[in-house]
Amino acid sequence: MAGQRVLLLVGFFFPGILFSESAKILTLSAFGGSHYLLMDRASQILQKHGHQVTMLWKGNFISSKEISYQVISWLLSENQKEELRKNLDFYSGKICGWMLANLYLPAILSLTLTLY
């Protein structure tokens, strides 16, 4: 019991001692623009703190600035794009149907009942 308290106190006052191991981290930037900028900054910070960072980038990677982490570009084939499109359509339809049934219709019914 006393050993756990000492370990807890050491970890609280000297966090770098207990957690000095680095991790292998995979970041994913599936969209461009602000999403890429956010993931780029997160990858830089993680790399700066000693982690081994790899970013998975959808599309051809073109960067004019120097980066400190590894970037792997990937592209979907036409079959994979079509399959992804079908899945997105299916799940977006399910989500919209659920929202309509569970959120909008009860709100409309309760509003209608209170008006009459």
Image (cartoon, grey):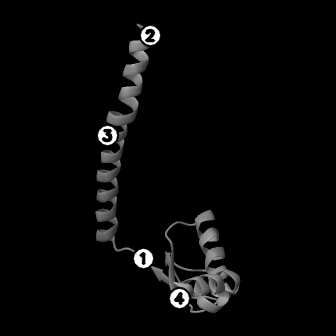
What amino acid is found at the position of numbered circle 1 in the picture? Leu
What amino acid is found at the position of numbered circle 3 in the picture? Gly
**Looking at the rendering, in which quadrant would you find the C terminus?**
top left
In contact (CB < 8 Å): disc 1 and disc 2? no
Residue toward you, 10 or 37: 10
> Which of the two discs, 4 and 2, labels the residue nearer the N terminus?
4
> Which of the two discs, 1 and 4, labels the residue nearer the N terminus?
4
Q: Which element type, helix, strand or loop, lies under badge 2?
A: helix
Image position, residue 101 (x, y; %): 32, 34
Q: Distance between the residues labelled 4 and 2?
A: 59 Å
Q: Which of marks 1 and 2 is in front?
A: 2
Q: Nearer the viewer, mark 2 or mark 3?
A: 2
Please, is residue 84 above or below residue 26 in the view?
above
Q: How far apart are marks 1 and 4 (CA)?
A: 26 Å
Q: How far apart are marks 4 and 3 (CA)?
A: 41 Å
What amino acid is found at the position of numbered circle 2 in the picture? Leu
> Which of the two discs, 4 and 3, labels the residue nearer the N terminus?
4
Instruction: Rate crowding at label 1 as few (under 14), some (14 to 19) or many (20 or more) other CA atoms within 10 Å.
Output: few
What amino acid is found at the position of numbered circle 4 in the picture? Ala
Question: For residue 42, what is the image quadrant?
Answer: bottom right
Q: In this view, does 92 lie to the left or right of 51?
A: left
Can you identify the residue that label 4 sits on?
23
Can you identify the residue that label 2 sits on?
115
Residue toward you, 101 or 62: 101
Question: For residue 35, what is the image quadrant?
Answer: bottom right
* Residue 85 appears anywhere in the view: yes
Can you identify the residue that label 1 sits on?
75
